[in-house]
Image (tube, grey):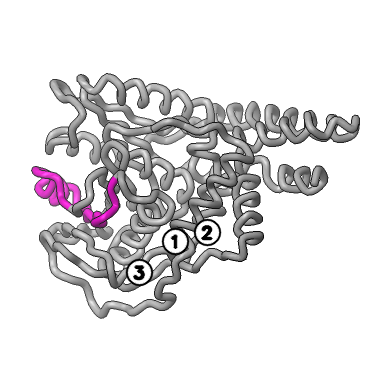
């Protein structure tokens, strides 16, 4: 995927995306399900419960940097349009769910899977592994690489989690998001923005660095939780050279941003293809068993980030004081792109001063 140049041009493109993908009105209520469905594979499942986590304003707040989101919302306001509450009409959506026959003593684990393809399918050989680990699998149809990320793929994953949690006894400490290829990259963004829902991600042949316009850092409280409570498992074939390189860049980025509970696994004699049962078993075993962090290492790493951020914000303030408004605006946008929500609310206050 080619990354467009960030900044105000990107924000205006974001606003056009919001108008096209997020401004459609949908049903606002929800209908509760009585009792849980049975186990096994269920196709063409229709869900009914909406989630406050999938409200469009919440998606914008979590998945975009503060200044990019503010610019986009202002452009929408000037156009006379507004975001709907939800971009998905669940009555029109179909999901595939796989439920192990035996409920684990402490509740099921849950894997919300974002596919690169259009149909909602359970990959071949996965059922027995899901049974072994007590993991429910859920996947939405029409959530592939050709679908809008913000208007469909991300909210569909959030709504899938909401509805499975409502129907089944799910352990809230074992809820994960995953995907394959382009779906894996979407899953990584969701894990970063929603660490209060997802406890980690299974990234099968698709990943990106964080701390840039494609994967901006969320606000501080969420990012601290991502650092301390999220487990990331990278799983790619040894012949999938391009995505192995992406994994290396992503894992290096995670370490830079103090995300240390990262596990990398390479499947032998495998190209760019979805994990087989052996690889999935290895990945789920790693995902379900997080590694304790070294509190001293984490504290030192966080201190370095805070020091760098403080210096960047001080630079903007100094430029404003000297009357160099254009330079200050440029420095502020660079800080917003790099630090995202970590720079808020000071970045938003500085933007208001400049405007």
- Please give the residue where the numbered disc 1 appears in the rendered image: 54
Q: Is residue 135 magenta?
A: yes
* Quadrant housing residue 88: bottom left
User: Mark 1 or 3, which is nearer the eye?
Assistant: 3
Q: Residue furthest right?
A: 322
Mark pair 1, 2: CA separation: 7 Å
Mark pair 2, 3: CA separation: 17 Å
Any mark on residue 89, and which?
Answer: 3
- Identify the residue at image location x=67%, y=36%: 333
For the N terminus, the image quarter is top left
Percent position of residue 287, x then y: 30, 40
SS at mark 1 in the image = helix
- Please give the residue where the numbered disc 2 appears in the rendered image: 58
Q: Is residue 220 visible?
A: no
Q: Are marks 1 and 2 in contact (CB under 8 Å)?
A: yes
- Would you call the spot at circle 1 few (<14 residues within 10 Å), some (14-19), or many (20 or more)? many
């Amino acid at each position: 995927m080619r990354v467009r140049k960030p900044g105000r041009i990107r924000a205006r493109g974001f606003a056009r995306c919001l108008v096209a993908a997020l401004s459609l009105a949908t049903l606002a209520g929800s209908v509760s399900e009585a009792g849980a469905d049975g186990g096994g594979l269920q196709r063409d499942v229709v869900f009914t419960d909406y989630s406050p986590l999938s409200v469009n304003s919440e998606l914008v707040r979590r998945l975009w940097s503060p200044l990019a989101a503010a610019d986009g919302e202002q452009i929408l306001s000037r156009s006379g349009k507004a975001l709907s509450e939800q971009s998905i009409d669940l009555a029109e959506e179909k999901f595939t769910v796989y439920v192990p026959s035996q409920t684990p003593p402490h509740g099921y684990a849950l894997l919300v899977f974002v596919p690169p393809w259009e149909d909602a399918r359970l990959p071949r050989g996965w059922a027995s592994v899901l049974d072994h680990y007590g993991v429910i699998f859920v996947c939405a149809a029409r959530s592939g690489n050709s679908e809008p990320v913000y208007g469909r793929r991300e909210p569909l994953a959030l709504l899938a989690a909401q509805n499975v949690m409502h129907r089944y006894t799910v352990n809230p400490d074992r809820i994960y998001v995953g995907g394959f290829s382009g779906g894996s990259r979407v899953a990584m963004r969701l894990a970063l923005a929603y660490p209060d829902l997802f406890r980690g991600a299974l990234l099968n042949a698709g990943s990106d660095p964080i701390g840039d316009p494609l994967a901006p850092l969320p606000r501080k409280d969420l990012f601290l939780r991502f650092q301390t409570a999220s487990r990331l498992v990278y799983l790619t074939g040894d012949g999938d050279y391009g995505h192995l390189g992406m994994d290396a860049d992503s894992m290096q980025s995670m370490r830079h941003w103090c995300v240390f509970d990262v596990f990398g696994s390479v499947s032998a004699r495998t190209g760019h293809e979805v994990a087989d049962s052996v690889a999935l078993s290895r990945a789920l075993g790693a995902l379900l068993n997080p590694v304790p962090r070294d509190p001293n290492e984490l504290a030192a790493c966080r201190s370095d980030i805070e020091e760098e951020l403080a210096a960047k914000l001080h630079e903007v303030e100094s430029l404003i004081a000297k009357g160099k408004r254009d330079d200050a605006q440029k420095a502020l946008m660079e800080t917003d792109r790099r630090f995202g929500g970590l720079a808020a609310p000071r970045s938003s206050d500085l933007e208001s001063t400049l405007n």
